[in-house]
Amino acid sequence: MITETAFIQIVRDELALPLAETDLENDFDKVVSWDSLHLLRLIAAVEKETGKRVSVGKLLSERSLRGIYTLLAA
């Protein structure tokens, strides 16, 4: 399981995004500099951190980092 703090740190460090904690709730369209490649890089970084494979199909339906974190933490 990954903590919310670790998840935010991965987004900041691995994706080099200036993520504020409030950005977790925002639609991807409102996250600064977000694009579809960030999702793929995020999945790779989370898999590396946790050692667990992530289902890309489930994550593609999410529209916020909070939604992605919720699926990853389940």
Image (tube, rainbow, N blue to C red):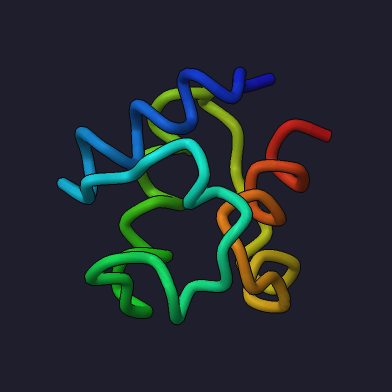
Q: Residue at x 52, y 23 (%)?
A: 50
How far across and down, in percent of the image, does residue 48 sit?
Answer: 39, 31
Q: Residue at x 35, y 26 (%)?
A: 9
Q: Residue furthest right?
A: 74
How far across and down, in percent of the image, does residue 18 sit?
Answer: 22, 46
Does 72 appear above or below 38? Answer: above
The one of 22 and 2 positioned closer to us in this rendering: 22
Would residue 71 appear left or right of 37 to someone viewing this image?
right
The one of 69 and 45 positioned closer to us in this rendering: 69
The one of 44 and 22 positioned closer to us in this rendering: 22
Q: Residue at x 42, y 24 (%)?
A: 49
Q: Residue at x 65, y 49 (%)?
A: 66
Residue 32's image quarter? bottom left
Q: Residue furthest front?
A: 22
Residue 37's image quarter? bottom left
Number of numbered discs visible in the structure rendering: 0
How far across and down, in percent of the image, does residue 15 sit?
Answer: 22, 49
How far across and down, in percent of the image, does residue 24 sit?
Answer: 55, 48
**Which part of the image, by quadrant, shows the C terminus?**
top right
Would residue 21 appear left or right of 61 to someone viewing this image?
left
**Which part of the image, by quadrant, shows the N terminus?**
top right
Does 49 appear above or below 41? Answer: above
Would residue 26 appear left or right of 49 to someone viewing this image?
right
Q: Residue furthest left?
A: 16
